[in-house]
Image (cartoon, rainbow, N blue to C red):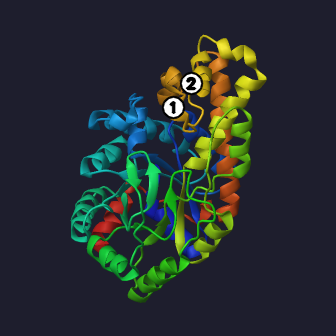
Amino acid sequence: MMLVPLRAILEATEKEHYAQGAFNVNAVAQAKAAIQVHEMFRSPAILQGADLANGFMGGRTDFMNATLEDKKVGAQNIGNAVKKYGEDSPIPVALHLDHGRDFDSCKAAIAGGYTSVMIDGSSLPFEENIELTREVVKYAHERGVSVEAELGVLAGVEDHVFSAGSTYTNPLDAVEFIKKTKVDALAISYGTMHGANKGKGAKLRKEIAIATKECLLHEGIFCALVSHGSSTVPQYIVKEINELGGDIQNAYGIELAQLKEAARCGIAKINVDTDIRLAVTRNMKELFHYRPELQNSASIGQIYRLLEEKKTAFDPRAFLPPIMNTVMYGDVPDEDVAAIVDCIERGVKEVVGTLIVEFGSVGKALAVERVTLDEMAERYRKEGI
């Protein structure tokens, strides 16, 4: 069947009392691997393409400068990949836009096949954030597409999202925001951070999630709470990268135990990106270490040279431009490129499989209503949302 709107998966988390991991993808191989590992555990799947991931998948290797046209092409490419591996899957799959910058970015994602979008107005004044979010909700809900927003500011860096400090979410403001915008999900600021350098010993303010959820329950309002900047940054992977010649310093994530506790306190969706980046980069470094003949490969030798030049980098997008047809369309022209694709797929499965188990979504596929976008649009219309 078609991909499902995010709302259907989020409703299942509330009914079944578990948290759903949401995993960012930046290549066809990543989308394929993420869906396959969710299938193995019979878990629902939330795949995310960040706003600038759409730019990268549109062929813009300097994705920080991606245009709207780049994003339109990339959204279509990610949408096609997720449909290819997810439409006939035995599990429900949602494709979600992470950190949509503006209304046009959200429209581009919806046109490309996304079943959910995030509009990030967290840097705006409260009332302006409400107005922008309302505009996106109206457009998206008419098409059965779910909407996530953000209230409060997370520190850290991820693509174009940057803040030197955090502003925690006020639970009462969150309830007012949700009432006025009718969003399906709200990302709150409660101690997480974007990027790999979250600080050693980062502590989550779980009381913010508890208070927000209690207020929503008291008001009888459905809205899933989302944890951004929630990568765990596995220290064993960081160590392996550095032993292979990398230079990743001061990289610490959110403790897994804290994320699992947050799930029990009302967090329904936990976003993870950095962990996948680290695992894929580690795998590529290992490939060239154990198979040195590939260092001079005509098709992937340049990837090795980029890995050697950019020792502090761990985002695979820094290394994959030599094989953009593979990234964008899944083309595998030779055995050397196939070896890189294998690195990508294994890295995704290692991280995602671990967190599916830890977050508790194993076997929850049957708990999700298999609703189409048209059916969800009708539900939104009848419920006035």
205 shown above or below 32: below
Locate residue 283, reporting x and y percent.
69, 34
Separation (CA) of disc 2 from disc 1? 8 Å
The answer to whether any part of residue 363 appears in the image is no
- The foreground one among 43 and 243 is 243
Residue 318's disc number: 1
Q: Residue 289 falls in which quadrant of the image?
A: top right
Locate residue 70, reporting x and y percent.
32, 33
- Left or right: 319 as drawn, with respect to 258: left
Q: Are marks 2 and 1 in contact (CB under 8 Å)?
A: yes
Locate residue 192, reporting x and y percent.
52, 64
Residue 306's disc number: 2
Specify few, some or many for label 2: CA neighbours under 10 Å numbering under 14, 14-19, or 20 or more. Answer: some
Amino acid type at circle 1 is Ala
Amino acid type at circle 2 is Leu
- The foreground one among 127 and 194 is 194
65 shown above or below 94: above
Q: Quadrant of the C terminus?
A: bottom left
